[in-house]
Image (cartoon, rainbow, N blue to C red):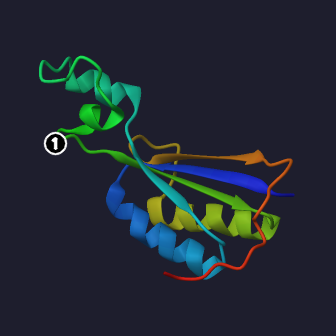
Amino acid sequence: MTQLVVLIVDNPDDCAPILDAWEAIGVPGVTIFESSGLGRLRKAGFREDLPLLPSLSDFFESDEIRHRTLFSVVDDEIKVEAMISAVHQIIGDLDKESTGFLFTVPVLKAYGLGRKRTRD
């Protein structure tokens, strides 16, 4: 079954080893977003320097540590389990505070998943 794997990584330094491990497993591609949780935004407090109509990047212009959110659509259950195992080996127990959060969602339809990718 095809799965969407979503991983929120608390420590951005964990991102490169995870991506290397996923690539070694044969994950076809990963989309990476810089992200931050509501709790971190609230801890940062109200900012006087924000424009009247702020963009997301305006909120993130600070010294706060941000998360990385990784998305990948994988059509092989064995790869999904290997991805999860790699995350646990690199980050550790995700039930501990300040580690990360991982979930999968079944994908009913996916287009372009099997296309051959070229490296730029």
**Percent of width and height locating residue 5:** 66, 53
Q: Which residue is mark 1?
A: 63
Residue at 73% x, 70% y: name it.
Answer: 79
Left/right of residue 43 with respect to residue 47 in the rendered view = right
Q: Is residue 72 above or below residue 86?
A: above
The image quadrant that residue 116 belongs to is: bottom right
Q: Amino acid at mark 1?
A: Asp
Left/right of residue 103 with respect to residue 8 in the rendered view = right
The image quadrant that residue 87 belongs to is: bottom right
**Percent of width and height locating residue 85:** 62, 65
Nearer to us in this view, 8 or 54: 54
Q: Is residue 3 above or below residue 114?
A: above
Left/right of residue 13 with respect to residue 1 in the rendered view = left
**Percent of width and height locating residue 15:** 42, 63
Nearer to us in this view, 89 or 68: 68
Location of the N terminus by quadrant is: bottom right
Q: What is the total number of numbered labels drawn onto the structure image? A: 1
Nearer to us in this view, 77 or 33: 33
Residue at 49% x, 76% y: name it.
Answer: 20
Nearer to us in this view, 81 or 29: 29
Q: Residue lying at the far left in this picture: please name it.
A: 49
Using a 10 Å C-alpha cutoff, classify the residue at mark 1 as few (fewer than 14 neighbours), some (14 to 19) or many (20 or more).
Answer: few
Q: Secondary structure at mark 1?
A: loop
**Percent of width and height locating residue 44:** 21, 26
